[in-house]
Amino acid sequence: MEHQLLKDLSQELPDGVRLERAANAIRQAFVCDAVGLLSLDQHDTLHMMAASGLAHEALGRRFVVGQHPRFAAILSRHEPTWFEPGSLLPDPYDGLLDDRKGSPLPVHDCLGVPLYRDPDHAWGILTLDALTTGTFDEAARARLQQLVLTLQAAIRVTELERENRRLRQLGISQQGIERIGETTEILGHSEAIQSLLHELDLVADSDLPILLLGETGVGKELFARRLHRHSRRSRQPMVQVNCAALPESLAESELFGHVKGAFSGATSDRPGRFEAAQGGTLFLDEVGELPLGLQAKLLRVLQNGEIQRLGTDQTIKTDVRIIAATNRNLKANTQAGLFRADLYHRLSVYPIPIPPLRDRDRDILILAGHFLEFNRARLGLRGVRLSFGAERALQQYPWPGNVRELEHVISRAALKMLSRGASRDQVLTIEAELLDLDIPAEDNKPDDTQTRSTSSGAADQTGTATPLTLAEIPPLKQTVEECERHAIHEALGAAGQNWAQAAKALGLDASNLHKRAKRLGLKKGLGE
């Protein structure tokens, strides 16, 4: 295991890959059921950076250290902390192990150790869980202590690589560069979101006007804040204007300011949002809602780089970067005369579409995990998880309200459980019906596994399946393995033997697909 970690140090790997490979290697070396690598931010909150053996939703979890005694105990010591089987301290991973999804953990071994980026600053923690008691004996704890130095070196290399990539992209000094582990609150591992974040980071420092396009609820404000944070203006203010909420009579004053006596009630000079954002970024949210009269005045400001406060002819030079956002089709609105074409072209120098949640595949479960942990803490619950049926419902639903709707669905379901008498002292499992989602009819079809099990019986001359005798019924494990082999064969065939694409189609991580194929005896037969 140490050899693999050291080998990875000599390679430049994508963000997260090194940590994911480390988690998998540690799990195999210690023959345990789950491993988690969590980073600690400045707000004493742990973020799951990589995991092996934990449910996919765990990657969206945020754990406030003060709310989790086990994590606090691990961080309070420099050496490994072992929790005896039967420890009364609540386990943050209750219901999150892959093989025991939604169920409280039985008596088990738990081991954790803090990780440091330097002697005075903790990076986070490493946790190991084993359902077999006695797994983490004194020899295992001593071995983990020896491993820490190599793992901390892997973390430091990962941090340096991320900073170096950002510096190459931005061409600026290291001052102001955020460190790995500090959350941007843009959660997701899907190809769509990673491609978008890469594009945002490239254009962030260009000073070009950016137009963020996307459906309601996709989180356009978060992406605007990321653009500002990664730009040269990051030390200057970012000022947000909700154009849909601006009263037409006061909109000009809000944007450009006014002088005393400019109108009834103007008792003093007041700077507008452009002046407040001087040197920084002005975010015009829902810019498509601006009235036409104000659009003309905004266009003049963007053309000339000057504003005039209401009530005076004196001009003020402005230096702001404009980021606009809308859920409307501005191009169609210009053709309908609802939005000025010249202003549209000024704002959309670099348009960036934000993908809807339905196009972000497994990010739905990561985001759901984030909102589940938020509601667990807010409602004072021991734990709250999703059943497999609830996970499937979340992934089938088209999400017209996107991330905002997902947040509301999870919060509502957690409250429903409590209103129906669920105990805060138990690990609560949210079932699909509590989500109250209107799944399209075509998605409510039987599973392929059900179809295959029906067709597995002998067919008579009428084409209907005849029931098997008890002697003919194969062991359940054999039936499940046959279904898995068939599904993997089909996915690989459809993906042209591309394992990454096949894993995505099956809803698995690529590493997990390789492990399953090896366990099922498929790897050799498939040329791997």
Image (spheres, rainbow, N blue to C red):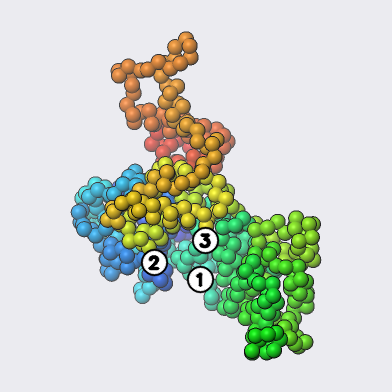
Image height of 112 relative to 491, above or below: below
The disc labelled 1 sits on which kind of residue?
Glu
Q: Earlier in the sequence, mark 2 or mark 3?
A: 2
The image position of residue 504, as x and y in percent, is: 52, 43
Left or right, 464 with reference to 75: right
Q: Residue at x 51, y 71 (%)?
A: 178
Q: Nearer the viewer, residue 220 or 141?
A: 220
Give residue 178's mark: 1
Q: Earlier in the sequence, mark 2 or mark 1?
A: 2
Disc 1 packing (10 Å; few <14; some 14–19; many ≥20):
some
Q: Quote the CA–CA distance across marks 2 and 3.
A: 16 Å
Q: Position of residue 234 (x, y in %)?
A: 58, 75
What residue sits 75% from the left and 87% below the top?
A: 312
Residue for point 53% across, 72% down: 177
Q: Residue beneath label 2, please?
A: 45
Give the amino acid at mark 2: Thr
Q: Which mark is residue 186?
A: 3
Marks 2 and 1, Cα distance to the nearest angstrom?
16 Å
Q: Residue furthest front?
A: 264
The residue type indicated by label 3 comes to Ile
Q: Quick one: which residue is furthest to the top in this view?
A: 461
Left or right: where 516 falls relative to 238: left
Residue 234 higher or lower than 428, as above or below: below
- As measured in the structure, the alpha-carbon distance from the residue carrying label 3 to the one carrying label 1 is 15 Å
Residue at left offset 65%, top offset 64%: 286
Query: Can residue 1 be seen in the rendering of this structure?
Result: no
Pick the residue in front: 433 or 208. Answer: 433
Mark 3 and mark 1 residues within 8 Å of each other at the beta carbon: no
